[in-house]
Image (cartoon, rainbow, N blue to C red):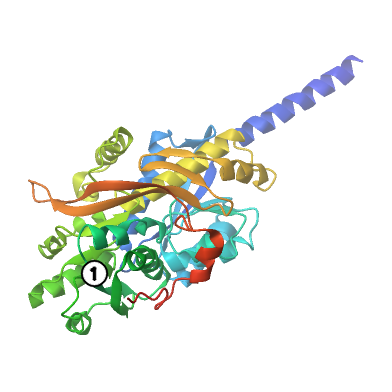
Amino acid sequence: MHKVIRTALAACCLVAATGASEAQEKLKVGVMATLSGALTSGGEDGVRGVQLAAKQAGNKMAGRDVELIVVATDASPDSALRAARKLVEQDKVQLIIGPLSGSEGIAMRDYSKTVPNVTFVNGSSGALETTFVNPSPNFFRFNSDGAQWMAGLGEYVFKDKGYKKVAVIGEDYSFPYTQVFGFALGYCRAGGEIVQRQWVPLGTKDFGSVIANIPDDVDAVFLGLGGGDAVNFLNQYSQTGGKSKFIGGSIMVDQTVLSSRGAAKRLLAGTPSSGAVADSWDDPRWKEFVKAYQDAFPADKRFASPSLFATNYYNAYNAMAKALDKVKGDLSDGGAKFRAELAKTELDAPNGKIKLDDNRQAIATTFITEVAELPNGDLTNKFVKTVPNVNQTLGLPLAEFKAVGLPSRTNPECKR
């Protein structure tokens, strides 16, 4: 009798010890970020966003120590696939934050379906198709897509700025298509006209022919460029002495460009834009986030204010942590309970409230902004107004939105 009790107690102690060991095991979180090519500065700030969120949480999720495994991509789908496979097959992660760029996100949507026990929380990629077309049950996006980031901008520049006719210059891939799509839906319905669209490869060095082809009779040029491409364009445009007014895509006027070296960026002063953040928004949660970001990194290793990328990666980490806490860190069922909680997770984020739709896509706030120069010479996105609760169909009925078709070089048309 006593022997049976002793055996049972020993077994219980063994189970308890095993559970304690599992509880102490580090939680590996893969982080995919674009760390080479034109969007490198965005990727670096995305990593800072994750690092800040982890630091604020004591480098823990659900009581478990977190090990961040950062892998680099170059914004191409192939590089994203290589990075994801490395994280899953070699590092054995069950949780991935990323990717950053639009076409990378589409690739991750498809890859995630082949590894159903791995949960992907998008970093900052913004192509519409990633969650709107054949969404993956284990891919979650807590940031708006590129079209949602444009909500209200088309109407604003037509009615408030008086831009009746515009040209477009954008990088030739899914995210800029999505941005122009979102801009055009509002702008064209307001009465505007897009008379020309020029698409350039990601990583373009020479914008000479593109600049020469800008029509003389447009009121403004919509710039769907980012990172190094945006800086190269501005430097070369300034050398021509051009006087065009600009409308900025979300990453054209992000801190990744506004904080860059050189005087050409001042061509953006007064440029209207829209996106997921407004540098000068006076909301207490945003101001607290900005201070935490500034305090966490040396001034020469960060931007004056968190970029769109830092903000989105920060929110992705916090969403993951919040849902994981609900299931007490238990991923033993392949993450099924965790994903069920993640789908219900709502964030009171620094850039506004965020919740997910049935496709695990964010419904969130869009900020209308204008670039302004501060007394110290820095450039900032001055807050103009918010467009709250922007969903993926931009407020249109689903059937009507689908009838427009998907973003492309030419869709939607925009003629008077």
Say few, some or many: other residues with alpha carbon within 10 Å of mark 1 (under 14 / 14 to 19 / 20 or more): some
206 lies above or below 8: below
Looking at the image, residue 247 sits to the left or right of residue 242; the answer is right
Q: What residue is disc 1 on? A: 164
Query: Which is more toward the observer, 98 or 361?
Result: 361
Q: Is disc 1 placed on a helix, strand or loop?
A: loop
Looking at the image, residue 62 sits to the left or right of residue 289; the answer is right
**Residue shown at 20% from the left, 63% from the top:** 162
**Residue 410 lies in quadrant:** bottom left
Q: Residue 296 in the image: state x and y as whole percent.
A: 28, 39
Q: Residue 323 in the image: state x and y as whole percent.
A: 55, 39
In the picture, the quarter occupied by the N terminus is top right
In the picture, the quarter occupied by the C terminus is bottom left
| Residue 250 seen in the figure | no
Q: Residue furthest right?
A: 1
Query: Which is more toward the observer, 378 or 188?
Result: 188
279 lies above or below 256: above
Q: Label 1 amino acid?
A: Lys
Query: Which is more toward the observer, 282 or 340?
Result: 282
**Residue 137 lies in quadrant:** bottom right
Query: Which is more toward the observer, 60 or 227?
Result: 227
Looking at the image, residue 76 sits to the left or right of residue 81; the answer is left
**Residue 41 lies in quadrant:** bottom left
Looking at the image, residue 212 sits to the left or right of residue 352; the answer is left
**Residue shown at 65% from the left, 56% from the top:** 116
